[in-house]
Amino acid sequence: MARITASVYTSHVPAIGVAIDQGKTGEPYWQPLFKGYEVSKQWMKENTPDVIFLVYNDHATAFSLEMIPTFAIGCAAEFQPADEGYGARPVPKVIGHPELASHIAHSVIQDDFDLTIVNRMDVDHGLTVPLSLMCGQPQAGRAR
């Protein structure tokens, strides 16, 4: 049986990722924003989740006006950071949970929920920025 430990809502502005990636989090302009995440980051360290369900809007990185799913679920074992026009963020690939995602997909599709299964997709700042804000910025190559 699963236990939900938190529900978090946060910004995912691309400039936040750039500030993290360029080491600007301590600059006066950025300090108030990043200071606001200290309590949350500490809580995450003390209450490390087994799985994170991260819901976000793809910003025409993986999907375009040619294909717009109502809802999509990532079922891959890993997801690479996308190149959003200025290179991929220097963050590790995002590790998926294919067994759990497939179970969820199967369950909701059986109940007539409109869901697209994604087995390969590069993820944009909508996913990587919240992970960086809440979990910290690990060294590239380390799994989350």
Image: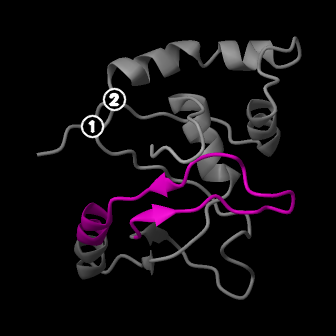
Residue 90 percent coordinates (x, y): 69, 46
Residue 33 percent coordinates (x, y): 74, 19
Main secondary structure found in the magenta portion: loop
Q: Nearer the viewer, residue 121 or 103?
A: 121
Residue receiving disc 2: 48
Instruction: Mark 2: give few (<14), some (14-19) or many (20+) Cα within 10 Å.
Output: few
Secondary structure under tag 2 reads loop
- Residue type at mark 2: give it: Thr
* Number of numbered callouts drawn: 2
Any magenta on residue 83?
Answer: yes
Residue receiving disc 1: 4
Q: Residue at x 67, y 12 (%)?
A: 35
- Residue type at mark 1: give it: Ile
Q: Residue at x 86, y 15 (%)?
A: 27
Which segment did they paint magenta?
76-104
Looking at the image, residue 46 sits to the left or right of residue 100; the answer is right
Q: Nearer the viewer, residue 46 or 22?
A: 22
Residue 63 percent coordinates (x, y): 67, 76
> If you read the primary sequence from the N terminus, does the residue marked by circle 2 or circle 1 appear first?
1
- Numbered tag placed on residue 87 in the rendering: none
Q: Residue at x 74, y 56 (%)?
A: 88
Residue 65 percent coordinates (x, y): 75, 82
Q: Quadrant of residue 45?
A: top left
Looking at the rendered image, the quarter that the C terminus falls into is: top left
The answer to the question of whether label 2 and label 1 lie on touching residues, with beta carbons closer than 8 A, is no
Instruction: Mark 1: give few (<14), some (14-19) or many (20+) Cα within 10 Å.
Output: few
- Does residue 37 sit above or below 20 in this rendering? above
Looking at the image, residue 50 sits to the left or right of residue 60; the answer is left
